[in-house]
């Protein structure tokens, strides 16, 4: 199992980015796919037409999103923690993704950089 810890800067305030990460309709706008999401702990979520699925664990409005991501039959949960911090350029994002199966690590790293935060960056730069 592997972990990813990365930082991103998105050029919008934390309030706006938090909405983009937790509002189902906004998620569908920047991903271009169907999503199921509500900012409520202990609810299931789905992004990119079901390519990413899991359970919401914790929310702190405009500050924190914590989720469990499902990887098949893995016994150890894969946990994603996204922390948002106000920054002079918008929002500084701290990502920690733990317990990633070894065979999924490279795809996850690319996905975070290009699909997830790359798509958000493109969405807000248009």
Image (cartoon, rainbow, N blue to C red):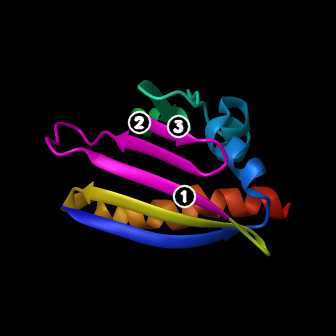
Which of pointers 3 and 1 indicates the residue nearer the eye?
1
Q: Residue at x 72, y 31 (%)?
A: 25
Q: Secondary structure at mark 3?
A: strand
Residue tagged 3: 47
Residue 93, label in figure:
none
Residue tagged 1: 83
Crowding near the residue tagged with mark 2, few <14, some 14–19, many ≥20 C-alpha atoms within 10 Å: some
Q: Secondary structure at mark 2?
A: strand
Left or right of 26, for residue 58:
left
* Above-or-below relation of 77 to 98: above
Crowding near the residue tagged with mark 1, few <14, some 14–19, many ≥20 C-alpha atoms within 10 Å: many
Residue span colored magenta: 57-85
Q: Secondary structure at mark 1?
A: strand
Q: Residue furthest right?
A: 126
Residue 57, label in figure:
2
* Distance Cα–Cα, label 3 vs label 2: 16 Å
- Prevailing secondary structure of the magenta residues: strand
Q: Residue at x 68, y 36 (%)?
A: 28
Magenta highlight on residue 102: no
Q: Quadrant of the C terminus?
A: bottom right
Q: Earlier in the sequence, mark 1 or mark 2?
A: 2
Q: Quadrant of the N terminus?
A: bottom left
Left or right of 82, for residue 70:
left
User: Residue 46 at x, y = what percent?
Assistant: 48, 32
Contact, CB < 8 Å: mark 3 with mark 2? no
* Above-or-below relation of 83 to 33: below
Q: Residue at x 23, y 38 (%)?
A: 72
User: Residue 63 at x, y = what percent?
Assistant: 61, 52
């Amino acid at each position: 199992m592997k972990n990813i810890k990365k930082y991103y800067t998105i050029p919008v305030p934390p309030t706006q980015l938090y909405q983009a990460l937790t509002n189902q309709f906004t998620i569908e706008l920047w991903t271009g796919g169907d999503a199921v999401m509500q900012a409520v702990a202990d609810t299931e979520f789905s992004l990119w037409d079901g390519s990413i699925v899991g359970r919401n664990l914790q929310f702190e409005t405009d500050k924190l999103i914590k989720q469990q991501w499902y990887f098949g039959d893995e016994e150890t949960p894969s946990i994603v923690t996204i922390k948002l911090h106000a920054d002079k350029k918008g929002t500084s994002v701290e990502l920690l993704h733990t317990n990633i199966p070894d065979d999924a690590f490279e795809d996850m790293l690319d996905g975070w950089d290009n699909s997830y935060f790359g798509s958000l960056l493109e969405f807000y730069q248009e």
